[in-house]
C-alpha cells in the first residue's frame, strides 16, 4: 500500500507541552502540520488566529496546512497567508456563488499559496466538481466540522474513492486529504480508498507521538 503524508492537527496538541510535542512531531519526519481555523460563526467553535500560526512558523519549517471554517474566507485566507500558510482550504458553503469560489481559489494562488476545497459530510459531490481542475487539494471531512474527537463517518470513503477515480479519469493532480476520526484502522481504510494525506489529532497527541505518526504512514 502506498505511503501517505500525515498532518498532525494542532487542534489536539497539549498547549502545556507545545515545545516538547512539536519536537516529537518533527522527529517523526512527517512533513505537514494541520491548522483548523474556526470563527465561532461558520462553526460554533473558536480556535486559532494568524498569530498562533506565526509562532509555529517560527518554530518549525513544516508545511503549514490551514483549513479555514469561517464566514469571511477571503479576509481570513489573506491573514493566514500573511502569517505563513502554505495551503489554504476553505468550504464552498462559505461563499455565495461559483464565481466567488473561483475568484478566491485564484486569489490564494496569486498570493503564493496552494488552494484547496472542502467536502464536509453534507456537501454534495456535484458542488465540488466545478473546482477540481483549479485546486491543489480536496479535503474530505469524515466528521462534522467544528470540534475534535469525533468518530469517523465511513461514508467519507466513498467520496475519497470518487475523487481518486475522477482525478485519474480527468488527468488532474490535486491531492486528496481526509480529516476526522483518523486512527490506524480508519487510516488504512482511507489509504485503500485513495487518500494522500491523513489529518490526525487526538490519535497522534494522546499517545506516543512518533509511534502514532509512523503507524499511519
Image: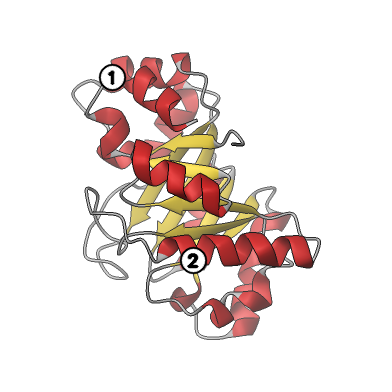
Is there CB contact under 8 Å for labels 2 and 1?
Answer: no
> Where is residue 84 shown, x and y percent of the image?
54, 39
Q: Quadrant of the N terminus?
A: top right
Compared across the picture, whether 161 is left or right of 130 comes to left
Instruction: Inspect this view and state whether residue 96 appears.
Output: yes
Considering only vertical position in the picture, is 43 above or below 48?
A: below
> What is the crowding at mark 2: few (fewer than 14 residues within 10 Å), some, or many (at least 20)?
few
Q: Mark 2: which secondary structure?
A: helix
> Where is residue 16 shown, x and y percent of the image?
18, 23
Query: Of the residues tagged 2 and 1, which is closer to the observer?
Result: 2
Instruction: Inspect this view and state whether residue 106 appears.
Output: no
Q: Nearer the viewer, residue 62 or 206?
A: 206
> Where is residue 188 shown, x and y percent of the image?
45, 42
What residue do we see at 28% from left, 35% from top? 203
Q: Mark 1: which secondary structure?
A: loop
Compared across the picture, whether 139 is left or right of 152 comes to right
Considering only vertical position in the picture, is 54 above or below 162?
A: above
In terms of image quadrants, where is residue 25? top left
Pointer 2 residue = 158
Mark found first going from the N terminus, 2 or 1? 2
* Cα distance in 3D space between marks 2 and 1: 31 Å
What numbered label is drawn on residue 63? none
Considering only vertical position in the picture, is 102 above or below 139?
A: below
> What is the crowding at mark 1: few (fewer than 14 residues within 10 Å), some, or many (at least 20)?
few
What numbered label is drawn on residue 208? 1
In terms of image quadrants, where is residue 166? bottom right
What residue do we see at 27% from left, 70% from top? 41
Q: Residue furthest left?
A: 16
Amino acid at each position: 500500500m502506498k505511503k501517505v503524508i500525515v498532518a498532525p492537527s494542532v487542534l489536539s496538541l497539549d498547549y502545556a507541552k507545545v515545545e516538547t510535542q512539536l519536537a516529537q512531531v518533527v522527529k517523526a519526519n512527517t512533513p505537514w502540520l494541520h491548522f483548523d481555523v474556526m470563527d465561532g460563526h461558520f462553526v460554533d467553535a473558536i480556535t486559532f488566529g494568524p498569530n498562533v500560526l506565526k509562532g509555529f512558523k517560527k518554530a518549525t519549517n513544516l508545511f503549514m496546512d490551514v483549513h479555514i471554517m469561517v464566514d469571511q474566507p477571503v479576509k481570513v485566507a489573506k491573514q493566514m497567508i500573511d502569517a505563513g500558510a502554505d495551503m489554504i482550504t476553505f468550504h464552498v458553503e462559505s461563499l455565495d456563488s461559483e464565481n466567488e469560489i473561483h475568484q478566491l481559489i485564484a486569489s490564494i494562488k496569486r498570493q503564493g499559496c496552494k488552494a484547496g476545497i472542502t467536502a464536509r459530510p453534507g456537501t454534495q459531490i456535484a458542488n465540488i466538481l466545478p473546482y477540481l481542475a483549479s485546486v491543489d487539494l480536496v479535503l474530505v471531512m469524515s466528521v462534522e466540522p467544528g470540534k475534535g474527537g469525533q468518530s469517523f463517518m465511513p461514508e467519507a470513503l466513498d467520496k475519497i474513492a470518487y475523487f481518486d477515480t475522477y482525478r485519474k479519469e480527468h488527468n488532474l493532480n490535486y491531492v486528496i486529504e481526509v480529516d476526522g476520526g483518523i486512527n490506524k484502522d480508519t487510516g488504512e481504510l482511507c489509504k485503500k480508498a485513495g487518500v494522500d494525506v491523513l489529518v490526525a489529532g487526538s490519535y497522534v497527541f494522546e499517545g506516543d507521538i512518533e509511534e502514532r505518526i509512523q503507524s499511519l504512514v
